[in-house]
Image: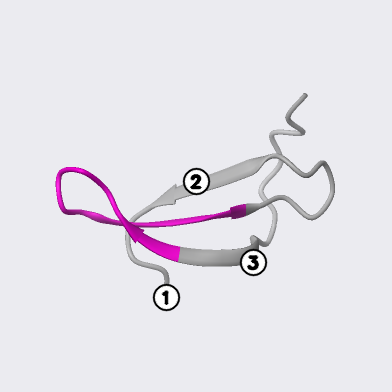
């Protein structure tokens, strides 16, 4: 079950989606589910 709260991403990884756009993928430090954020991280 996802907590659906805005949190800091644990172990963030910069990835590129299939269409070539940048994204950030990581893990929620509270519930342990995968977090996916579209766009370059600042």
Q: Quick one: label 3 or label 1, which is nearer the N terminus?
A: 3
Q: Is residue 5 left or right of residue 34?
A: right
Question: What's the residue at 72%, 50% (across, down)?
Answer: 28
Q: Residue 35: x, y in percent?
A: 58, 46
Q: Residue 26: x, y in percent?
A: 59, 55
The residue identified by callout 2 is 36
In the picture, the quarter occupied by the C terminus is bottom left
Residue 19 is marked as none
Start and end of the magenta stretch? 14-26
- SS at badge 3: strand
Mark 1 residue crowding within 10 angstroms, few (<14) / some (14–19) / many (20+): few
The residue identified by callout 3 is 11
Q: Is residue 27 above or below residue 42?
A: above
Residue 20 part of the magenta segment? yes
Q: Quick one: label 2 or label 1, which is nearer the N terminus?
A: 2
Real-space CA distance between mark 3 and mark 2, rounded to the nearest whole angstrom: 12 Å
The residue identified by callout 1 is 42
Q: Quick one: label 3 or label 2, which is nearer the N terminus?
A: 3
In the picture, the quarter occupied by the N terminus is top right
Q: Nearer the viewer, mark 3 or mark 2?
A: 3
Question: What's the residue at 41%, 69% (across, down)?
Answer: 41
């Amino acid at each position: 079950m996802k907590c659906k709260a805005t949190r800091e991403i644990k172990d963030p990884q910069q990835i590129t989606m299939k269409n070539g756009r940048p994204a950030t993928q990581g893990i929620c430090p509270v519930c342990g589910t995968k977090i996916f954020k579209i766009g370059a991280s600042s």
